[in-house]
Image: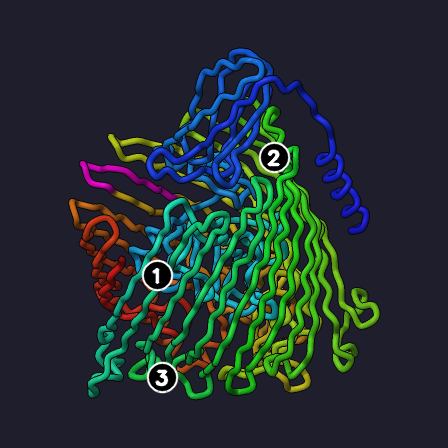
């Protein structure tokens, strides 16, 4: 099946690429398209004139050949106001136009790429899509991307794992349902399927795009619940250099009994610095950055020290061909614990058996080639070499090497509003790890995908796509006999392939009103960690060789409504969503006849998640002051499809039904999925008054009503702590900044100003009130 699909896709590429389309060439019209304010060349701007059209190259230049006559030239670029110019062309002449476009005043025109793998306005996306700009990252002094993702309505980060609209719980650092991309390339750690957030250069980000809902048809197995696409910044016409330093001091906790450093001169703190430089040297684009963090946590004997460096080179060989690479290296060490010693005086002190100390080295090199053929079709080669080397205590070390390659073809028929995107990819991972019982493992993935988007009547966007995903894992000989379902195994290889489909629509009701609806399937193959992990973090984590893949679907209907208040504009977004997962994987307590027990990833049955999302974003001048706003509320109703709380509790565990096991393993006696917040709201508003900026931010999470039942007996004091802290958490931050000229800024940040004591997952208390002083240049 996959061979037939690949042949079909390659055949479509061939026909589209080599089709003919000749026209008479009498006069030449050429020119350059730039940003009116900055003079920056606009790459791939669209030029339409008569029945002809073209796009600008990497220097903003364009050229088109036409018959003599009078024409209306329209130039457009996503995120900018279109411009029309009347031109008269005579045979045998060359006319030059230099066109300057102004940025669009509306957020709905923000350029995005993640929803369809090509640039389109935010308002026209057929799925829920949110965008974070670098200014928000910088003003919050976000040391890691996961910190800023918590600003997005519907997104929660629980101990480093992304949870979008309740689609994920907490899985002990393994098996993310949210795909992380860096410049469109998957960036999850290959063995565990988890994001390494501090690998991402926060000092050099162009924007972050977040899709809420199943995106497997476009981005593969781990995108079951959504994607986070980090687009790094690139060199522009003028050199850009940025640098910053900061110092953070953590206050004593609200409960004086937990103040473990009160009788010392020591105070938990963090210090860091960053540097980024982007510049063009002729045809060579150069990007580099560096970051260092030294942090001693409010949790005793936990720390984080790492340094990161990035380098990006792109050579523009011609207006049709460019190539280069991006690279990141991150090295350091850290210490953390999984749960506290007790919930009272030792709540910020770790249980001796739950500590994890690591010395890490991670790096990736991402070579790429982009080529536009004579018809303007885009051919793209993306690749990655990703190496992870974690030296850890307690036999938890792991090493993995990932090799990834993708070919992507895209053709646009501007005259009929049709875009075709198709591609093939493959990856291979080699893993050697104490974490998996000293096994040497190999995992492979291959996929082919195609997506078509069509615009009708200049109002209606319809998008449809499919993907065939194939995975295999070489099973060690001594494990083969332990696998009960051997129908997927052939020649020691466990393999599986599935097709996935998606469909979406967006209708522009008026100039500032967009109605959308989407449906997409999801599929996730178990990660190596979920299937083979064998370690101890204060209690055993065990492998599950019979773990099955999970599937699902997600649908939503939503509306974006733009608004303007004087010179302040933005949009309100309201969405209702519904997701179902089948054979959902979650880490669950088990006990078997072999007297083995602990936590392992299990297929817990089918789940049903419904809810609604409300968000508002705004920018511009409000009462004469430049003001930005991001805010929202999310409601989640996450349930098991099979749940039974009325049964004989004396039944042995191995005789319980899935519905009874779901009740047995939950701390709640009613039907709700574990590790979810049913209600969340959050906001961040910043305003500038002269040289001063002031901002207020906050969030609320309702009480996490269900966790693993065993935690109540294994973790000291957890039952009492959860009972005493069952009203949810509300946290507020304040930021002040003084701007020196155009680039220099001194900021003072006060986070958790009311010193709220709260947790995002059991037995790990979050940061008390803390103050940061930051200087940016």
Residue closer to the observer: 106 or 493: 106
**Residue 675 showing in the rendered view:** no
How many residues crowd mark 1 within 10 Å: few (<14), some (14–19), many (20+)? some
Q: Are marks 1 and 2 in contact (CB under 8 Å)?
A: no
> In the rendered image, which residue does mark 2 sit on?
453
Question: What residue is shown at x 35% (from left), y 42% (from top)?
Answer: 616
In the image, taking residue 250 as reference, residue 224 lies left or right, namely right
Q: Are marks 3 and 2 in contact (CB under 8 Å)?
A: no
Question: What residue is shown at x 62% (from left), y 44% (from top)?
Answer: 371
As drawn, 18 above or below 72: below
- Whether the magenta-drawn stretch holds residue 192 is answered as no
> In the rendered image, which residue does mark 1 sit on?
142
In the image, taking residue 381 as reference, residue 134 lies left or right, namely left
Cα separation between marks 3 and 1: 23 Å
Q: Earlier in the sequence, mark 1 or mark 2?
A: 1
Cα separation between marks 1 and 2: 36 Å
Identify the residue at the far top of this view.
69
Q: Earlier in the sequence, mark 3 or mark 2?
A: 3
Q: Give how far across and how far down residue 515 sits, in percent.
A: 48, 32
Start and end of the magenta stretch? 615-626
Label at residue 301:
3
Q: Quadrant of residue 305?
A: bottom left
């Amino acid at each position: 099946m996959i061979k037939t699909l690949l042949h079909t896709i390659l055949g479509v590429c061939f026909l589209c690429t080599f089709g003919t389309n000749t026209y008479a060439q009498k006069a030449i019209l050429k020119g350059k398209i730039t940003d009116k304010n900055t003079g920056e060349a606009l790459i791939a701007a669209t030029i339409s004139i008569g029945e002809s059209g073209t796009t600008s190259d990497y220097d903003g230049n364009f050229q088109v050949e036409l018959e003599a006559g009078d024409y209306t030239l329209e130039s457009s670029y996503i995120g900018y106001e279109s411009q029309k110019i009347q031109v008269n062309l005579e045979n045998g002449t060359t006319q030059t136009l230099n066109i300057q476009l102004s940025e669009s005043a509306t957020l709905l025109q923000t350029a995005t790429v993640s929803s369809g793998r090509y640039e389109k306005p935010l308002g026209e996306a057929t799925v829920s899509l949110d965008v974070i700009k670098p200014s928000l990252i910088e003003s919050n002094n976000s040391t890691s991307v996961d910190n800023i993702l918590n600003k997005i309505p519907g997104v929660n980060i629980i101990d480093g794992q992304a949870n979008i609209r309740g689609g994920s719980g907490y899985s002990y650092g393994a098996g993310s349902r949210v795909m992380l991309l860096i410049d469109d390339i998957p960036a999850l750690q290959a063995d565990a399927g988890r994001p390494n957030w501090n690998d991402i250069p926060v000092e050099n980000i162009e924007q972050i795009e977040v899709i809420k809902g199943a995106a497997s048809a476009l981005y593969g197995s781990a995108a079951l619940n959504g994607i986070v696409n980090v687009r790094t910044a690139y060199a522009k016409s003028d050199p850009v250099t940025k640098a910053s330093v900061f110092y953070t001091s953590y206050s004593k906790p609200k409960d004086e009994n937990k103040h473990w450093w009160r009788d010392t001169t020591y105070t938990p703190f963090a210090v860091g610095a960053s540097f980024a430089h982007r510049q063009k040297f002729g045809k060579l684009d150069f990007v580099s950055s560096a970051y260092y963090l030294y942090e001693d946590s409010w949790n005793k004997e936990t720390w984080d020290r790492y340094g990161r460096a990035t380098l990006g080179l792109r050579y523009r060989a011609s207006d049709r061909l460019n190539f280069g690479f991006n690279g990141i290296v991150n090295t350091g060490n850290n210490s953390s614990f999984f749960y506290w010693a007790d919930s009272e005086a030792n709540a910020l002190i770790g249980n001796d058996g739950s500590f994890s100390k690591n010395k890490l080295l991670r790096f990736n090199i991402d070579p790429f080639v982009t080529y536009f053929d004579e018809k303007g079709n885009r051919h793209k080669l993306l690749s990655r070499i990703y190496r992870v080397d974690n030296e850890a205590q307690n036999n938890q070390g792991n090493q993995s090497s990932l090799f990834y390659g993708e070919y992507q073809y895209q053709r646009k028929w501007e005259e009929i509003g049709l875009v075709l995107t198709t591609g093939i990819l493959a990856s291979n991972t080699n893993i050697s790890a104490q974490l998996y019982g000293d096994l040497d493992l190999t995992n492979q993935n291959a996929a082919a995908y195609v997506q078509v988007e069509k615009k009708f009547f200049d109002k209606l966007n319809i998008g449809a796509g499919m993907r065939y995903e194939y995975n295999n894992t070489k099973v060690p000989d001594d494990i083969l006999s332990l696998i009960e379902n051997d129908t997927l195994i052939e020649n020691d290889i466990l393999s599986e392939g599935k097709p996935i489909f998606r469909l979406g629509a967006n209708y522009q009701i008026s100039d500032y009103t967009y109605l959308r609806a989407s449906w997409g399937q999801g599929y996730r193959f178990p990660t190596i960690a979920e299937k083979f992990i064998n370690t101890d973090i204060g209690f055993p984590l065990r492998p599950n060789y019979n773990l099955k893949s999970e599937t699902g679907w997600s649908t939503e209907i939503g509306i974006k409504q733009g608004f303007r208040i004087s010179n302040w504009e933005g949009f309100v977004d309201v969405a209702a969503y519904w997701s179902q997962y089948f054979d959902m994987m979650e880490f669950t307590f088990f006990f078997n006849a072999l007297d083995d027990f602990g936590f392992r990833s299990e297929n817990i049955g089918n789940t049903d998640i419904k809810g609604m999302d409300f968000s508002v974003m705004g920018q511009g001048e409000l009462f004469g002051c430049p003001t930005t706003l991001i805010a929202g509320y999310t409601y989640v109703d996450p349930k098991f499809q099979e749940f039974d709380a009325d049964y004989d509790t004396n039944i042995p565990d191995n005789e319980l039904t899935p519905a009874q096991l779901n009740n047995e393993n939950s701390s709640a006696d009613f039907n709700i999925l574990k590790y979810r917040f049913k209600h969340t709201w959050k906001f961040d508003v910043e305003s500038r008054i002269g040289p001063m900026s002031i901002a207020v931010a906050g969030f609320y999470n309702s009480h996490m009503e269900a966790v693993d039942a065993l935690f109540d007996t294994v973790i000291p004091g957890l039952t009492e702590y959860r009972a005493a802290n069952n009203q949810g958490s509300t946290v507020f931050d304040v930021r002040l900044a003084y701007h020196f000229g155009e680039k220099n800024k001194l900021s003072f940040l006060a986070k958790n100003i009311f010193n709220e004591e709260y947790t995002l997952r059991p037995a790990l208390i979050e940061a008390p009130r803390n103050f940061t002083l930051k200087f940016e240049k």
